[in-house]
Amino acid sequence: MAAKMRNRLDRRTLGRLRLASQRLVPYPAAPRGLGPDVDGSVAGTVRWMTAMQAQDLQAALWAVGSRAPGSGLADVRSALDSGAVVRSWPMRGTLHLVAPEDLHWMLDLTAERLTKSIASRHRELGITWPDIEKSRDLALERVAGGGAVSRAELFQVFDAAGQATQGQRGIHILGTLCRHGWLVQGPLAGNQQLLVDFQSWIPVSRRPAREEAVAEFLLRYFRSHGPATIRDFAWWTQLPLTDVRAAFEDVKDQLVELEFGGTSYWMSAETASLLDDRVPGQRSVLLLPGFDEFVLGYTDRSLVLKPEYFNRIVPGGNGVFKKTVVAGGEVIGTWAREGSGARAAVVPDLFDGTKPLGATARAAFARAARRYQAFLGA
């Protein structure tokens, strides 16, 4: 039976628990085995997070770096170049970073549902299954023998063979080829990723049975994102809520339930144990990238971001999430890097101008800014 906790809580405490589970603040020192033993490498960080939002490549690189102590930009790029981390569309039709051995089983769970949801758009674009098969053959011929090709080059191949790529037709064809495990994004070429043959780039894939895979997906999500709700997970993956609830019965005994505001939140026992002492991160100030999992990993973001400030991080609801300043588990503003080289500076834009950062928070902000600059190699 899952443990249930009813501690006196506030939003910031739950936010700090999320910081801890997402590896954005360290756990207190503890004998090995008493806290989560996590590989702090770039690849280990992505594997722990299960999947990390990555439609903005530069943001995704810092999302990993902010969780992998001591890593630099070159380390994260190297992980993509080597295939230790892969970037694809495992769910929601959105690019994520995942561990290579996990990508295929995630696609097995999510691809069919997404394909059905975009079927009408494919009809509008004149994309038929024979078009997909022809494009697949053209693409695999182009990358045969370990070759790699840019998106622009591949679209030229498609266009020359009569498969038009204009008007989003090309990106929909490409996404379909990646969702079906024929292509995957591979090494970087500047700020773009080249496309490679899936089987050559990821020679070993785990393929658990569907029920086992959904249960693992659930457990890993709550361990890396908790406290979170069942609906958070269902939204995050876009898996049917009925399937999610059925799988949840298989893993809930490995989780702890926390009641807050009339809602049940779930997390690992290790994260819940932090409530026995003091949840870390009370005086932390973090500079997170746009599209970070701390904000986007949940359907309800109000625990860490007051609703009246939603529009400040996504102006006009344009779908482009700004970089966020997170203090003590709460999003309190946005930030930007201004200038370049030695003169570059990280500048905050706080939501509430009447509450400037105090001396301790200013010092923490300065440390966070130096860490970001160091990550870039500045």
Image (cartoon, rainbow, N blue to C red):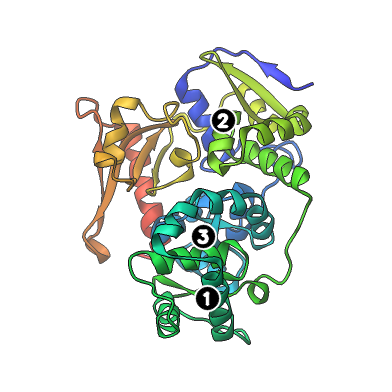
Q: CA distance from mark 1 to mark 2?
A: 37 Å
Q: Amino acid at mark 2?
A: Arg
Q: In the drawing, does residue 58 fall left or right of residue 89?
A: left
Compared with 165, 24 (above or below) is above
Q: Nearer the viewer's eye, disc 1 or disc 2?
A: 1
Compared with 37, 107 (above or below) is below
Q: Which of the pair 233/154 is nearer the observer?
A: 154
Provide the residue designation for mark 3. 71
Query: Crowding at label 3, few (<14), some or many (≥20) Cα neighbours within 10 Å?
Result: many
Q: Amino acid at mark 3?
A: Ser
Q: Residue at image x 55%, y 66%?
A: 129
Q: Which mark is residue 231?
A: 2
Q: Nearer the viewer's eye, disc 1 or disc 3?
A: 1
Residue 290 position, x and y percent, is: 37, 48
Compared with 212, 58 (above or below) is below
Provide the residue designation for mark 1. 135
Q: For residue 133, which quarter of the picture? A: bottom right
Query: Crowding at label 1, few (<14), some or many (≥20) Cα neighbours within 10 Å?
Result: many
Q: Residue at image x 54%, y 79%?
A: 139
